[in-house]
Image: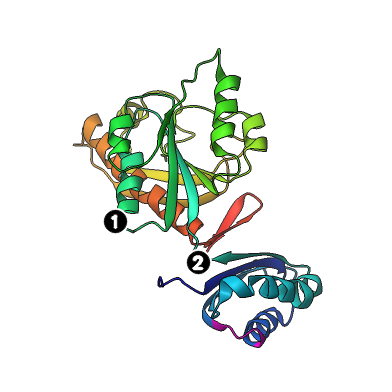
Amino acid sequence: MTASADIARLIISCPDQHGIVAAVSQTIAELGGNIISLDQYSTGVEGGQFFQRTVFHLPGFAAARPEVEAAIEAKLAGRFSMDWQLTDAARPKRVAIFASKTDHCLLDLLWRHRRGELPVDIAMVISNHADLADDVRTFGIPYFHVPVDKHNKAAAEAKHLELLQGNVDLIVLARYMQILSPEFLEQVGAPIINIHHSFLPAFIGAGPYQKAKDRGVKLIGATAHYVTEDLDEGPIIEQDVIRVSHADDVAQLTRYGADVERAVLSRAVKWHCEDRVIRHGNTTIVF
């Protein structure tokens, strides 16, 4: 039996009102569950939106899950106009990683997964280049090379959908240097997390670290966010920065940037897969 056996996570969102926490706690107690942790947040004292992440232990949860879902629907969902999600902590989310030629974010995720630091099952790596195939296969992860260019983009995305649909819970873009089409985003059926340097929108396009050096930037950072049709403008999950010096050359700035990107992306993936991130419009609540 794993440490996460019989552990459930209940994620809720609803208009803030009196009695939500008490009602959720009572419902779990009546089912025989014991609350391990509870995080909550409201966007306003009056008229706000309420969010809560409740982790509880319930012996035989897998078998009791239909009963738990029925109780939530009957006692909580209608009463509080509640959107809710119930997950089993013992079931890691299946993740697909997209990458191109740059390897630092991809290999960091694979390394953390192998060390047991990421609660995920990495189902596959998909790349528009073959360069990283040997590195990935040393981790025992399937690698699919799907070339993409302006002449075959629709066919490539059709292949991506064939590999992904019904097979993964999350897609991670680990420096995947292709823009996903609106049609792909509409059909893929799983959330997507992207990572990029924090210079946007100041230094768009090629050579951002040279541009940053030329402007004398003093901070380098990274942003992990959910992907939407608005390029690089989806809800932000995590960000971080480090201070740099006028004495750092472009190569050193690039290394610093890679370090920050690795850390930020791994935290974002971990938090998502632990059901800590709740989307609210174009922002997020992270417990």
**As rendered, which of 287 and 163 lies closer to the eye?**
163
Of labels 2 and 1, earlier in sequence is: 2
What secondary structure characterizes most of the magenta part?
loop
Place residue 227 in its image quadrant.
top right
Question: Residue 115's mark?
Answer: 1
Q: Residue at 50% x, 54% y: name it.
A: 93
Residue 26 vs 261, above or below: the answer is below
Q: Real-space Cα distance between discs 2 and 1?
A: 18 Å
Badge 1 crowding class, 10 Å Cα cut-off, few under 14, some 14 to 19, many 20 or more, is few
- What's the amino acid at mark 2? Ala
**As rendered, which of 89 and 250 lies closer to the eye?**
89
Q: Is residue 18 visible?
A: yes
Q: Which residue is mark 2?
A: 89
Residue 82 vs 216, above or below: the answer is below
Place residue 192 in its image quadrant.
top right
- What's the amino acid at mark 1? Arg
Q: Is residue 233 left or right of residue 27?
A: left
Q: Is residue 45 visible?
A: no
